[in-house]
Image (tube, rainbow, N blue to C red):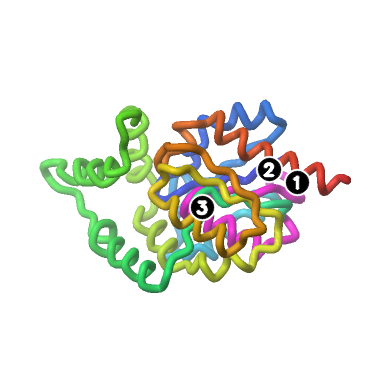
């Protein structure tokens, strides 16, 4: 069964490197996509919204000759996955929201102010201090178990895309996930981990849709895919298996 994987901002499809193998062992074809401007994807010639990121998914499926698939998104990617389900519902079998982010209007405004102050004004410094600043911001989420080699890769990913990295979070905080989550009509799994920086928001998503399936991993951080790949794949594959079996019965 195909599974489209939408990464968090400001990273790339490399976020899922550690789970392609385990997914394949479960009979799941992982298809990770670099959102426009991230990884190796061309940037847009305008400031994109979540709705714009979602529009790239059908073209990828068409190119791979895939009629329908599951879609999973992590953090910003969860918003993209939501919008894919709303815009292209006939191509989706089920949805996995790995770290949904329903926010109030005030919280989204605060997020946009953060992007304006910490990301949009990013400039290189002659002493290389800009690298340290990005590293310090990212490591606010680190724990004693953090793999510093992976942490270094995350910063490289942030800077290596051909588009401005602030586009991702800007799109995320413009998007009203609290409004669109209730509109999903597909079988949906809320996947979260208790150490996620937006764990509380996942709980809020469950309140919005108590009918959704839920899988919760203990601990971890915003990098749960790298930290607990086996548990992550177990949760994802279990949901896909249940929905696939139900659709065939």
Element under disc 3: helix
Whether residue 53 is visible to the viewer of this picture, yes or no, is no
Pointer 3 residue? 77
Q: Given contact means CB atoms under 8 Å apart, are the residues at marks 2 and 1 in contact?
A: yes
Q: Is residue 237 left or right of residue 221?
A: right
Q: Earlier in the sequence, mark 3 or mark 1?
A: 3
Q: Is residue 51 above or below residue 131?
A: below
Q: At x 37% / y 31%, what residue is drawn?
A: 150
Q: Is residue 125 left or right of residue 223?
A: left
Q: At x 49% / y 46%, what residue is drawn?
A: 7
Q: Earlier in the sequence, mark 3 or mark 2?
A: 3
- Front of the two marks 3 and 1: 1
State the CA–CA distance, disc 3 to disc 1.
Answer: 21 Å
Badge number at residue 239: 2
Which of the image's four quarters has the N terminus? Answer: top right
Q: Given contact means CB atoms under 8 Å apart, are the residues at marks 3 and 1 in contact?
A: no
Q: Position of residue 50 (x, y in %)?
A: 50, 63
Around disc 2, counting alpha carbons within 10 Å, would you say few (fewer than 14), some (14 to 19), or many (20 or more)?
Answer: many
Element under disc 1: helix
Q: Is residue 80 above or below residue 193?
A: below
Q: At x 36% / y 53%, what residue is drawn?
A: 165
Magenta residues? 62-91
Q: Position of residue 54 (x, y in %)?
A: 57, 59
Q: Position of residue 121 (x, y in %)?
A: 23, 60
Pointer 1 residue? 243
Q: Nearer the viewer, residue 37 or 226?
A: 226
């Amino acid at each position: 069964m195909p599974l489209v994987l939408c990464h968090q901002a400001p990273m790339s499809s490399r976020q899922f490197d550690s789970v392609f193998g385990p997914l394949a062992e479960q009979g799941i074809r992982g298809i990770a996509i670099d959102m426009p401007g991230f990884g190796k994807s061309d940037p847009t010639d305008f400031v994109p919204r979540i709705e714009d990121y979602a529009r790239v998914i059908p073209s990828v499926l068409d190119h791979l000759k895939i009629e329908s698939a599951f879609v999973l998104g992590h953090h910003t990617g969860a918003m993209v996955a939501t919008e894919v389900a709303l815009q292209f519902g006939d191509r989706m079998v089920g949805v996995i929201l790995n770290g949904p982010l329903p926010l109030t209007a005030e919280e989204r405004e605060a997020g946009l102010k953060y992007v304006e102050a910490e990301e949009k004004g990013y400039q290189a410094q002659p002493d290389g201090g800009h690298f340290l600043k990005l590293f310090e911001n990212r490591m606010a989420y680190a724990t004693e178990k953090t793999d510093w080699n992976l942490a270094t890769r995350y910063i490289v990913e942030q800077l290596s895309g051909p588009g401005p990295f602030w586009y991702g979070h800007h799109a995320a905080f413009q998007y009203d996930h609290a409004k669109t989550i209730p509109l999903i009509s597909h079988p949906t799994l809320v996947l979260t981990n208790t150490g996620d920086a937006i764990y509380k928001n996942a709980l809020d998503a469950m309140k919005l849709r108590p009918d959704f399936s839920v899988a919760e991993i203990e601990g971890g951080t915003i990098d749960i895919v790298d930290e607990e790949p086996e548990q992550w794949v177990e949760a994802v594959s279990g949901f896909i298996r249940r929905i696939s079996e139900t659709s065939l019965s």
